[in-house]
Amino acid sequence: MSAADTAVTSSGSLAEFDRTTSLWGQLTMGTALLLSLAAPLYLVFFTDLGITAGMIWTAYLAVAAAFFVLWFVEPITYYPVLGPAAMYQAFMIGNIANKLLPSALVAQAAVGAKAGTKRGEFAALMAICGAAMVHVVSMLLFVGILGTWLVSIIPTDIVDVARLYIFPAIIGGVLVQLIVTMKQPRVTVIAVVVAVVVLFVLVPAVPVLAKPATGVVVLITAVLAWFLRSRKATATPTTLVN
């Protein structure tokens, strides 16, 4: 088979992969949406809990006020790194920022794949599969089997300290991992400055922004990173190899 025939075959396979991903991704996400709404709809329409339309809209607006920005920011910011197939996986599994995205970035760095290419997309796809499997097995073993026993023998004071520091420690490790992997010092500085200003200046001045502060930081950082990016770098064509 000639090089031209190989390229045509590869292009056709990739197109078929994209079509299959789009079809089953939409069907799977739609099914998950219906299943997730099944229990609330049952409680509203088939029980005597006294749930009114006003209560539903109040709850919806409360959630929207906290996460409205993220509904738009997260898909836009994750897509260039993950690609369509991994996006379906990521939003089905959850824990994108603190588990799936770091896994995808590390996998792409390990195989030398650039984000936005087919190789990068496949690396992210396999990384998310691996992360999900490790997560499920770890939950079964270390939480389902050993978790309750371990918590029962640990003194309460130590548990309180762990609850206070373990989450910042995990997020700090993920943050360092992302900074090292992305190798974008200018964007890192912009993100740190924006986060400090929002946390210590904007939120105290406008307390209502406390809940959506993360989304505000992400949005402002993305805009500033775009306008303040280096103009010296030349664009490189997207390939299937890198």
Image (cartoon, rainbow, N blue to C red):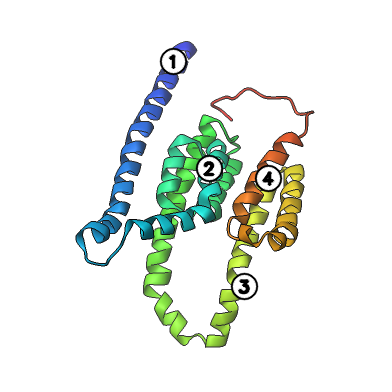
**Which secondary structure lies at badge 4?**
helix
Q: Residues within 10 Å of mark 4 (few under 14, many from 20)?
A: some
Whether the residues at callouts 2 and 4 have beta carbons within 8 Å, the answer is no
Q: Amino acid at mark 4?
A: Ile
Q: Amino acid at mark 1?
A: Val
**Which secondary structure lies at badge 2?**
helix
Instruction: Tell me the tag on residue 165.
Output: 3
- Residue at 73%, 44% (x, y): give it: 187
**Which secondary structure lies at badge 1?**
helix
Q: In the image shown, does 211 or 86 lie closer to the viewer? A: 211
Measured from the top left, where is residue 213 in percent x and y? Answer: 63, 56
Measured from the top left, where is residue 120 in percent x and y? Answer: 54, 36
Q: Quadrant of the C terminus?
A: top right
Residue matched to label 1: 8
Whether the residues at callouts 3 and 2 have beta carbons within 8 Å, the answer is no
Residue depth check, mark 4 versus mark 1: number of the one nearer the observer? 4
Q: Residues within 10 Å of mark 2 (few under 14, many from 20)?
A: few
Q: Is residue 29 left or right of residue 223?
A: left
- Of the image marks 3 and 4, the number of the one nearer the N terminus: 3
How much space separates mark 3 and mark 4, taking CA atoms? Answer: 28 Å
Residue matched to label 2: 72
Q: In the image shown, does 111 or 66 lie closer to the viewer? A: 66
- Of the image marks 2 and 4, the number of the one nearer the N terminus: 2
